[in-house]
Image (spheres, rainbow, N blue to C red):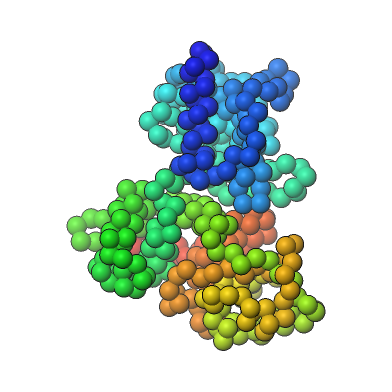
Amino acid sequence: MEKEIINNQRKRLENLFTNELGIEITVVYTEIAIGINYVPDHYFVVQLGKYKIPIIAEFKTEITNLHQIKKFIEFSKKFEGIGILVSEVIDEKIKEHLREQGIGFYESSGDVFVPLNFKLNKTQEEFFSSKELIKKQGFRAESNIKLMLYFICKPSSLKSTQRELAENLSLALGTINSALSNLEKLKLIITRGNQRYFGKFEEIVNRWRISFLDFEKKELSYGRFSPINEIFSAEWRNINLTNLNSYWGGEAAASIKTKYLYPGAFTIYTYESSPISLLKKLRLKKDPNGTIEILKCFWPDELNDQANYTVPDFVAYCDLLNSGIDRNIETALLLEERIKKVLKEKEY
C-alpha cells in the first residue's frame, strides 16, 4: 500500500478516537515490531478512564477474503489490547467474523466496531469487560445523556411533548429538539407516527455508559475521599443520604438493591454545589487513592429511589459496568434484568 494512503488511514483512525469517540491518544508508535514477524501498520495507546489501552491497526484498500488478513487476525486474538482493521471496503461476512473474534473494524462508509472485551496489561490485573464501544458521534453532549436517561428511568416520558421534556429536564426547547433528533438518528429512540419506542437495549447501554464515563471524568467528580475512622465502613447502610441531598451509586447502590455485593468502593451522587456538608457529616478526608468518590447529580431528583437512598438503577448499572471489575459485572446482570423488564413494553 502506498505511503500516502497509509498516512491518510492513520489520520482517519486517530480522528475516530480523538474527535468522534472523544478518547485521548497518549502515545503513538506508528510502525513497530511487537511480535515475531509481525509489524502492524499503526500502533498507539489510548486512555479510557483509568485504563491505558494499546491499539494495533492493519490498513487495506479492500477486503473480500479472510486470507488477506490471516496474520492480523491471529495476532489480534492474542494481543492484550484492541486490534482494528481499517479499509475502504470490507465484505459483510468478514465484518461478522471480526465481531465474533472480538476484532474491530473501521470502513470508509463510517461503519465501525471497536470491541472492549479483552484482558488489560498484566500489571493492571483487571478485565475491562464491557461488550463494545460503538461510534457515538452526536451523543456526547450532556443534553443527549440527560434526555436518554430520563426516557430510560421513566419510560412513560416517551409520550411527553418536547415542551414537557424541556420543563422536566430544565433544558431549552431547542436543546430538547436537537437531542431528540440525535437519539433518533442513532436509533436509540425510534419514532413511528406519534409514538416513541426504545431501540436495541445493548446499543443504548453502550452508547450511554461510554459517553457517561467521558462526561463523568471531565465534569462530575468532586474527587476521592477516605473515612477518618472505621465507623463509615460499619455504618454506611444506616446513613440517610437524602437528608444530605445525596444518593448512593455504584457498588453501594447495587449492594442495597440486590443484596448480592458488599462494596469495596463507594460512589455518592449529590445535588449539593459543594461536597463540604457531606465530608463533615460522613467524616471524610481528601485522598486521591480513596475508596469513596463523590460526584454531581445531573438528572431530576424524581428519578432517584427515595426509599433506598439510591440513584436510578440504570446509573448504578452503568457504574458497575464501567468499573471493569468482574464481581461488579456479575452484579450488574442482576440489575439488567430489572431494567430490561421495565423497558420491554416500550421496545420497538
Query: Residue placed at 65% from the left, 28% from the top?
Result: 29
Residue 32 image-quadrant placement: top right
Residue at point 46% right, 42% down?
20
* Residue at position x 57%, y 72% in the image: 269
**Place of residue 228 in the rendered image (x, y in percent of width and height, measured from the top left):** 78, 77
Query: For this rendering, which residue is in front, 248 or 199?
Result: 248
Q: Is residue 132 left or right of residue 92?
A: right
Q: Residue furthest left?
A: 193
Q: Is residue 62 visible?
A: yes
Judged from this view, the residue extending furthest toward the right is: 229
In the image, residue 9 lies at what x, y percent?
49, 25
Is any atom of residue 338 visible in this view? no
Residue 82 in percent (x, y) is at 61, 36
Q: Residue at x 40, y 67 (%)?
A: 150
- In the picture shown, does residue 223 fall above or below 86? below
The foreground one among 74 and 235 is 235
Q: Residue 104 location, x and y as percent?
A: 53, 34
Q: Is residue 80 above or below residue 175?
A: above
Could you say which quadrant of the image residue 69 lies in? Answer: top right
Horizontally, residue 11 falls left or right of residue 30, namely left
Point out the image quarter for the C terminus.
bottom left
Front residue of this view, candidates 317 and 31: 31
Q: Residue furthest top?
A: 2
Residue 109, quarter of the rendered image: top left
Q: How many marks?
A: 0
